[in-house]
Image (spheres, rainbow, N blue to C red):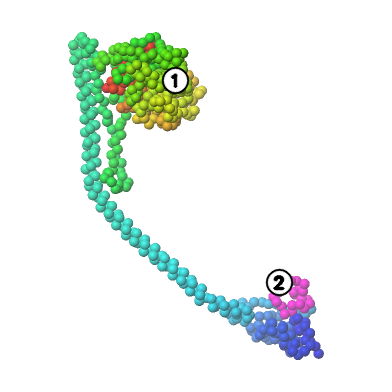
Amino acid sequence: MSKNCCVCQRTLEADADVGHLFVCSHALCVVCFDGYGNHPLRQVCFTCATPDAADLPETAVWQTMEKSNTLLVDSDAEDSDRTGKSPAKGHSKSSFIVIYRPIGPEDRPLEKLVGDLEMDDDDDDDDAMTSRRPKELERFLRSMTEKRTEAEKKEAAFEARVEEVRKEIAKHAKMCRSLIDRDEARLLQQLEETRAATLAESRAMRDGVGAVIDRARQLMAKGQPTERDVEQVLSARVNPCPVQMQEIQVTVNNIAPKDEGNVVARLCFQTIPDDSAVLSLPALIGSIPGNSFPVTGIAVLDREVFVVNDTDPEVFVFRVGTVSSHATHKRSLPLLHLLSPSVVPSPLDLDACPRNRCVYVLDSHNSQVYRLDPADGYLVAWWAVRSPRNLSVTSSGSVLVTEEGKVVEYDPKGRTIRSISPPSKFSSLLLSGDRASMRHPRHAVEFDGGSGLVVSDFLDDRTPHVVYVTERCKGTPSRWHGNAPPASGADGFDEPRHLAVVDVSGHVMVADRKNNRVVLLNRKLEYVRDLVKDSEVKEVRSPMRLRLDQARGHLYVGQSNGVTLIFRVLL
């Protein structure tokens, strides 16, 4: 009689198809019997559960539940939703269901359970893994050994470098100790030499001033000194102290130099700005007469004074004596017909160049700059400018022309070197007024040894009336003096027309036209005092132009009434 397999329901027609026959006469096919392997579970009939699961050995991994006419596993559910791989899989009717429960550590040792459940394929994988483990371990060991060797090499290299640095430190320390021993004497010697030179020059100046004072007192004691004697005293020059008094600072060196320089520290000497070179009470020692037209330009070259007046088409040349300060007219340089018979010039400013032995005249009517031979007025060169105001000559021989909104520097042949534009507007915190702009330069003079320019600037009563310092290659002011609207006293100016700079101290003299004075500013453009003013010298009338003769200590002040006053302002 044929039977059906308890699991797959396959018909077992021959004995060869039966893999296992249960006590209850039910059977498993060969395939299902082999599929469950040598597991104790196959001793239980998958149809009637004979014998009972409780009679199986303790190693069983299956349990029986209460018999029920209803399956606990939905036959329509997916295999993954069923409770383990139940022996009753595929059966719709049964009196019980067998579910899988993993045995915990409390039931049996995990190693034995895993060993019982392993299949043949897993055994093959473990064999392959077991064969690879020695190689992986060997590779890991080699990698870690290389890391340790690398760390040991780095430590050895670091220790070697530390030893090298230790030797270098000892070497430099030895050198520094020897240099320090020598340096103390050098610093003290340098300090003493500077002290001796400064005091010697200062005492020489003081002795010179004392000699002039004694001479003046002797003349005053006579009661009736001659005019020549008075002029000799007024013209006597005293060399100012070129070093002046200096601020001394000690700067400690951070790194010992390899050369023969100082090691411990360096001495820094900085000249203290003062006005010792400028007389506190300038003396009016002479004048140059003129016509009724305002003086528009003054230049000094080889003890000759060149003067031009507004609308006067010629340059007047005067000779100022070595002793007498009275000016003697020597000649005139005509400006008419320089370019063509129809050209009528209107000289606006004038300056001389000792380097190139020439005189420059600024013609406002024709917007031209003329370069003349000072001896006969021969026209050497000329070039056109735009809306000119004033001009000046630098120590290098270039020409600075203030034009509308900028300062232009030309070479002696009239080729443009650079154009310097002042800033269009200043902050309201710095300048007040309706139009706080500084784009109307009047006069520009070389300053700070040629690295900068000092510029006067104004247009009308609504613009700033200021004097400022700017770098030669830029237009941004670094410091200034003045404000808007125009002012008097120490706070400002009212038409600062022209400038002069004292080379030895950096002081700036400003022709403050409507305030009838010449103002003295220090290098920082701070107000020092009124150098010349109408309340002390009645001859002062609206100063228009300034020219400082550094060699003789004379300041020439050209005025609106055509007269040029000569003051002794320097030692």
Residue 391, percent from left and from top: 40, 22
Give whichever of discs 1 and 2 has the lower sequence position.
2
Q: Point out which mark residue 69 bears.
A: none
CA gap, disc 1 and disc 2: 107 Å
Task: Please tell me which residue is depicted at 34% across the width and 18% down the height of the picture.
Answer: 374
What's the amino acid at mark 2? Ser
Which span is picked out in magenta? Answer: 69-92
In magenta stretch: residue 85: yes
Q: Point out which mark residue 368 bears.
A: 1
Can you see residue 496?
no
Q: Point out which mark residue 80 bears.
A: 2
In magenta stretch: residue 443: no
Position of 237 with respect to 141 (left or right) is left
Can you see residue 435?
yes
What's the amino acid at mark 1? Gln
In the picture shown, does residue 361 fall above or below 504?
above
Position of 87 with respect to 297 (left or right) is right
Residue 539, percent from left and from top: 34, 11
How many marks can you see? 2
